[in-house]
Image: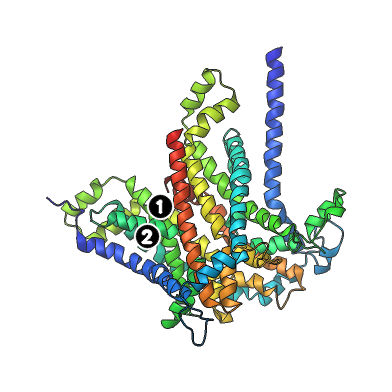
Amino acid sequence: MRTAQAAALRRAGTRFLYVLLVLFAFGQLFPLLWVALYSLQKSGALFGPDLLAWPHQPQWVNYANAFTNGRILRYGWNSLVVVVTSTIASTVLSFCMAYAIARMQWGLKAVALTAISMGMVIPIHTTLLPNFFWFRLFGLLDTRLGVIIPYIAFTLSFNTLIFIGQFHNLPTSLEEAALIDGASWPRILWSVVRPLATPAIITVSVMTFLTNWNEFIMANTFLATDDLRTLPFSIIKFQGEYSADYAAQFACMVMVALPPVLLYLFFAKWIMAGATAGAIKG
Amino acid sequence: MKGPFHNKPVVAALVLPGVALLVFAMLVPLLFSIYFSLTNWSGFGPFRNVGLANYKEILLQDTTFWRSLWNAVLLMVVTIFIQNPLAFALAALLSHINERFSAVLRTVYFVPAVLSFVIIARLWVSIFNPTFGIFNKLLAAVGLKWLAVSWLSNPSTAIWAVLWIITWQGFGWALLFYYAGLMTVPKEIEEAARMDGASWLQTYTRVIIPYLFPVISAVIVIDVISSMKQMELILLTTEGGPGHLTQFIGVYLYQKAFVADQYGYGNALSVIFVLVSVGLTLLVQRFLRTTSEAA
């Protein structure tokens, strides 16, 4: 009798916990839902008394306006160029640095590792002012390269640490065998190590892509020409010129949010793996 | 006898490109920052060396600087003592329920963390908007209309609204770290504690939390660093206002250099920012290490 009661109580408790967890999930998603719903209403609907209103006549014109006025195509293309370039470069360079630190034997290894770890502590914002001066000396200000370089530099430290973690989990025997067979170093890295490190490569490239895709402050500081600006500026456009068009602003936010959310849903497993490796080992 | 992994030219080829980039984009700029921090340069035109005058002014007279440090400390307290325990509790719940359901929820909780600061900022500026924002509408709906204010521009609420936005977005990260940590706890030690008659609460406080101390420490260090580094969300919501009440050092140095045309002064703030960030990280790491050794 008592055990039956206890079981019932436990079931009720479990159900309560489930409700709690779902409510919390709702809390995380509610703001996004609000924006998504009103992106399909007329701007004026936002000023009505309703908390949420289903768009019975979806105003797709908001998306058309957001697309044109937010310069989604132009900024999106710029983002793609800058982000893909910096992601590939950062992945390759951190792969190489990590290999040298995890596997090779050399004197300054500990120093290099400390310096790289320090790179994670230094805030991006402290380089904004000096780089504004320093990059100008090389004509890098207001060019794509001027953001690509810091985008690589600021993701290198984290990526290198992720790769080091991965390399420590791989056996050295395959590389040794390949060396005895007379394979060159580039060949060993490409044909032997790279396939084994695929999980870390995916994690690193997806996380670098997301970080740089969302980056705003360096782009805002170093890029003055409108034609060079990246996707976050689509939303900024609706703060100025088109600030009264709230519905289009919301539509713009949905469009800009969509690529990273989709990428995340697709690669969630790898992002989780990388983030936790960074936290627990770092 | 040198092994095959003892090859200096290969090491150089692997390490130098990355190091060169770090030197170019991080180290040299820091040196320039130190140089300009000793000048009164406005950003254009002539300037002269003023020694440590900027530093003296920041540390002795600049109340906005101290306010921005204070805000960072406030954010650390909120994340470490409110957000983290909540995230830990939720992660613990998620580790006990049906795995598929748990995976879906974990995905949902993390969505805000993958969005750009620009989206998060515009989102909450709209939510807190006094005329059409849903926050005040919600208050009115539950009969608390008298509480409704312009949250991000009211001097007594602005900092809390900003802290809320930052902790809301960071919640997914904290949860993810703790969930991953909980997954590493061996089932045996939990079962052994239960066999000894420990309640689930005791199992957590006496066995699991001590076991996860390294993970908790790592998350706390991350919280400290990221609290110092907050910048974009503030710049895009309150710009540090009203009256510098929500100022953070990253925003402040930016405004000094590019809005107030005090480039030298901004660089001095920048140098102090680096020193405080690095120093605080080392200090917290040491503190946590000695605490774990004492325990």
Q: Residue at x 34, y 53 (%)?
A: A195
Q: Residue furthest top?
A: A1
Residue B209 drawn above or below residue A213:
above
**Circle 2 sits on which residue?**
A94
- Is residue A240 shown to the viewer in this render? yes
Q: Nearer the viewer, residue B275 or A238?
A: B275
The lab-note entry on whether marks 2 and 1 share a chain reads yes
Tell me residue B151's x, y (percent).
Answer: 76, 59
**Circle 1 sits on which residue?**
A162
Q: Residue at x 49, y 49 (%)?
A: B221
Tell me residue A35's x, y (percent).
Answer: 73, 60
Under mark 1, the amino acid is Ile
Tell me residue B139's x, y (percent).
Answer: 83, 52
Residue A251 drawn above or below residue B225:
below
For mark 2, name the chain.
A
Tell me the distance, in whole angstroms, between the alpha carbons under discs 2 and 1: 9 Å
Describe residue B105's horizontal placement relative to residue B186 as left or right: right
For mark 1, name the chain.
A
Residue B125 drawn above or below residue A240:
above
Tell me residue B252's x, y (percent).
Answer: 59, 68
Q: Quadrant of residue A9?
A: top right
Q: Residue at x 85, y 57 (%)?
A: A50
Q: Residues within 10 Å of mark 2 (few under 14, many from 20)?
A: many
Describe residue B89's horizontal placement relative to residue B34 as left or right: right
**SS of the residue at dot 2?**
helix
Under mark 2, the amino acid is Ser
Q: Which colour style is shown?
A: rainbow
- Is residue A78 shown to the viewer in this render? no
Please report contact status of discs 2 and 1: CB closer than 8 Å, yes or no: yes
Describe residue A102's horizontal placement relative to residue A16 as left or right: left
Q: How many marks?
A: 2
